[in-house]
Amino acid sequence: MSYLPVAHIDDLPPGSTKLVEIECLEIALYNVEGSIYATSNVCPHQGASLADGKLDGEEILCPWHQWCFNVKDGVSPLNPRLKVRTYPVKLEGKQILIDLPE
Ligand code: FES
């Protein structure tokens, strides 16, 4: 496990998204009613920024062609074979940390 700080909770109010870049990765953060989740920012369809999409409950709607993914497990509710990578998240005080692969 290697949790790295990526953002401050005050910069991610409930219902919002945020793009962070760390170690050459683009990661989208989501605040779902106070719980924080993280996925790859890159839509597996044609690469749009998921952080620019619309967060509706636990689902992020891609801004380009409206594919959607559950931000908890990355799986599309429309097609379970479609998935975006997720990352473990934890909070330390007001700091959001993400576990990146070694
Ligand atoms: S790029 Fe995301 S749905 Fe097409």
Image (cartoon, helix red, strand yellow):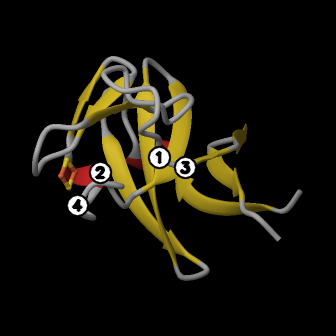
Residue found at the far right of this picture: 1
In this picture, residue 17 sits left or right of residue 39: left
For the C terminus, give its image quadrant: bottom right
User: In this view of the protein, which residue sits in the foreground, 6 or 45?
Assistant: 45
- Residue appearing at x 33%, y 17% in the figure: 57
Task: For marks 4 and 3, give the CA distance.
Answer: 14 Å
Label 3 SS: loop
For mark 3, what is the residue? 85
- Residue appearing at x 40%, y 42% in the figure: 12
The answer to whether the residues at label 2 and label 1 have Cβ atoms under 8 Å apart is yes
Q: Quadrant of residue 60?
A: top left
Q: At which x and y percent is residue 85?
A: 55, 49
Q: Nearer the viewer, mark 2 or mark 1?
A: 1
Label 2 SS: helix
The answer to whether the residues at label 2 and label 4 have Cβ atoms under 8 Å apart is yes
Sequence-earlier tag: 2 or 1 = 2
- Residue appearing at x 10%, y 45% in the figure: 65
Q: At which x and y percent is residue 100?
A: 72, 62
Q: Is residue 47 above or below residue 39?
A: below
Q: Is mark 2 within 8 Å of ligand 1?
A: yes
Sequence-earlier tag: 4 or 1 = 4
Which amino acid does the dot numbered 4 rest on?
Ala
Task: For marks 1 and 3, give the CA distance.
Answer: 4 Å
For mark 2, what is the residue? 50
Task: For marks 2 and 1, give the CA distance.
Answer: 10 Å
Q: Which mark is residue 84?
A: 1
Which amino acid does the dot numbered 3 rest on?
Arg
For mark 4, what is the residue? 48
Sequence-earlier tag: 2 or 3 = 2
The answer to whether the residues at label 4 and label 1 have Cβ atoms under 8 Å apart is no
